[in-house]
């Protein structure tokens, strides 16, 4: 019997990312942004639990990345869409990074992740509130 995880957030990117990118897509320059937003809306899914961060994405949602909090050394958040959604970059001990794009309620999700990292890595200098 496995250990149960408490799910804090589960879902896809914020709908505003798709809407804004689609509006920008009416210009030729904005077309790549629109295509990226459509792909994210279709296949990108986040799952934030009390044990890990899971991101499913890629073409047709076939790639999955799981990160446990004790492996995270730094998280940076960037607001988007007038602060309605945001992006996060999670840096692991081995130097690799995972980008979480267009997360709804990104401030609350960031705070939740920060609390879990602080609990798993007391005194970690790379994690700043």
Image (tube, rainbow, N blue to C red):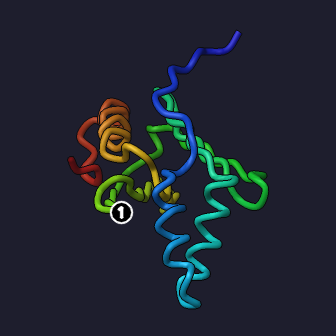
Q: Position of residue 24 (x, y in %)?
A: 49, 78
Looking at the image, the residue that sits furthest to the bottom is: 28
- Left or right of residue 116: residue 26: right
The residue that appears at 46% across and 57% down in the rendered structure is 16
In this rendering, the answer to whether 37 lies above or below 14 is below
The residue that appears at 69% across and 54% down in the rendered structure is 42
Q: Which quadrant of the structure image shows residue 83?
A: bottom left
Q: Position of residue 44 (x, y in %)?
A: 63, 52
In this rendering, the answer to whether 58 lies above or below 105 is below
In this rendering, the answer to whether 32 lies above or below 107 is below
Residue 97 shows in this picture:
no
Give whichever of 67, 55 is nearer the camera.
55
Other-residue count near label 1 (Cα within 10 Å), few / some / many at <14 / 14–19 / ≥20:
some
Give whichever of 113, 28 is nearer the camera.
28
The residue that appears at 41% across and 58% down in the rendered structure is 87
Looking at the image, the residue that sits furthest to the top is: 1
- Left or right of residue 73: residue 34: right
Q: Position of residue 38 (x, y in %)?
A: 64, 63
Q: Position of residue 35 (x, y in %)?
A: 65, 72
Q: Which residue is mark 1?
A: 80
Residue 52 shows in this picture:
yes
Tell me the element at label 1.
strand
Looking at the image, the residue that sits furthest to the left is: 129
In this rendering, the answer to whether 26 lies above or below 58 is below
């Amino acid at each position: 019997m496995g250990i149960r995880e408490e799910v804090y957030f589960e879902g896809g990117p914020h709908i505003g990312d798709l809407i804004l990118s689609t509006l920008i897509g009416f210009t030729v320059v904005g077309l790549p942004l629109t295509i990226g937003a459509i792909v994210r809306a279709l296949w990108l899914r986040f799952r934030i639990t009390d044990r890990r961060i899971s991101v499913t994405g890629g073409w047709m949602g076939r790639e999955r990345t799981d990160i446990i909090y004790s492996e995270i050394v730094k998280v940076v958040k960037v607001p988007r869409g007038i602060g309605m959604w945001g992006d996060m970059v999670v840096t692991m001990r081995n130097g690799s990074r995972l980008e979480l794009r267009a997360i709804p309620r990104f401030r609350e999700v960031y705070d939740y992740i920060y609390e879990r990292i602080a609990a798993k890595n007391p005194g970690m200098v790379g994690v700043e509130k």
